Image (cartoon, rainbow, N blue to C red):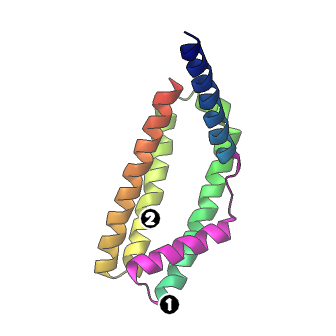
């Protein structure tokens, strides 16, 4: 009986320690500046798609514009956080439409810059990332419920 109690206490204390470590890892997340994020994205794309110097420059400019738009949108969303809970379907529709319009514009610009082979590979990678983000968001939503 004593052994069972000791094992139970040890297992509870170890699980508590493991959870503390997980929380500490989240606090150590490093935030990059928009310029740093852009540079990292362009370098990853260069490795993946074998971009020329001209393409790197053009994509860097596109990414910087996109980062600026995202920053503005993120600030607007933070300001409207409370209103977002009370939104109706028209507001949600307008927001989704705006987001999709931005994605279409980015898609068109990338098609101009990249060769057909590079574009196909970029599109495939973008689809993978989108699916990964959706799965991650679904997991977060299920944990919150």
Q: Which of 126 and 102 is in front in this view?
A: 126
State the image coordinates of residue 85 (x, y, percent, origin top left).
59, 27
In contact (CB < 8 Å): disc 1 and disc 2: no
State the image coordinates of residue 145 (x, y, percent, origin top left).
50, 23
- Above or below, 36 against 134 in this view is below
Magenta stretch holds residue 52:
yes
Residue 29 is left or right of residue 120, and the answer is: right
Q: Is residue 88 visible?
A: no
Identify the secondary structure beneath mark 1: helix
Residue 71 is left or right of residue 90, and the answer is: right
Q: Nearer the viewer, residue 32 or 69?
A: 32
Name the residue that disc number 2 marks.
105
- Above or below, 31 against 95 in this view is below
Which residues fall within the magenta stretch?
A: 27-53
Q: Can residue 127 be seen in this view?
A: yes
Other residues around mark 2 within 10 Å, as few (<14) / some (14–19) / many (≥20): few
Q: Sequence order check: which comes first, mark 1 or mark 2?
A: 1
- Above or below, 120 against 128 in this view is below
State the image coordinates of residue 124 (x, y, percent, origin top left).
32, 64
Quadrant of image for the N terminus: top right
Residue 121 falls in which quadrant of the image? bottom left
Q: Which mark is residue 53?
A: 1
């Amino acid at each position: 009986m004593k052994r069972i109690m000791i094992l139970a206490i040890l297992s509870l204390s170890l699980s508590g320690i493991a959870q503390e470590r997980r929380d500490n890892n989240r606090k150590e997340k490093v935030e990059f500046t928009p310029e740093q994020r852009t540079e990292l994205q362009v370098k990853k794309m260069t490795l993946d798609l074998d971009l020329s110097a001209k393409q790197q420059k053009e994509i860097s400019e596109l990414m910087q514009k996109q980062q600026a738009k995202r920053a503005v949108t993120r600030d607007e969303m933070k300001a409207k956080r409370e209103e977002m809970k009370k939104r109706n379907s028209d507001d949600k529709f307008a927001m989704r439409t705006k987001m999709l319009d931005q994605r279409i514009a980015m898609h068109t610009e990338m098609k101009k810059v990249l060769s057909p082979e590079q574009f196909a590979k970029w599109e495939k990678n973008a689809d993978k990332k989108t699916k990964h983000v959706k799965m991650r968001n679904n997991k977060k939503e299920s944990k919150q419920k």
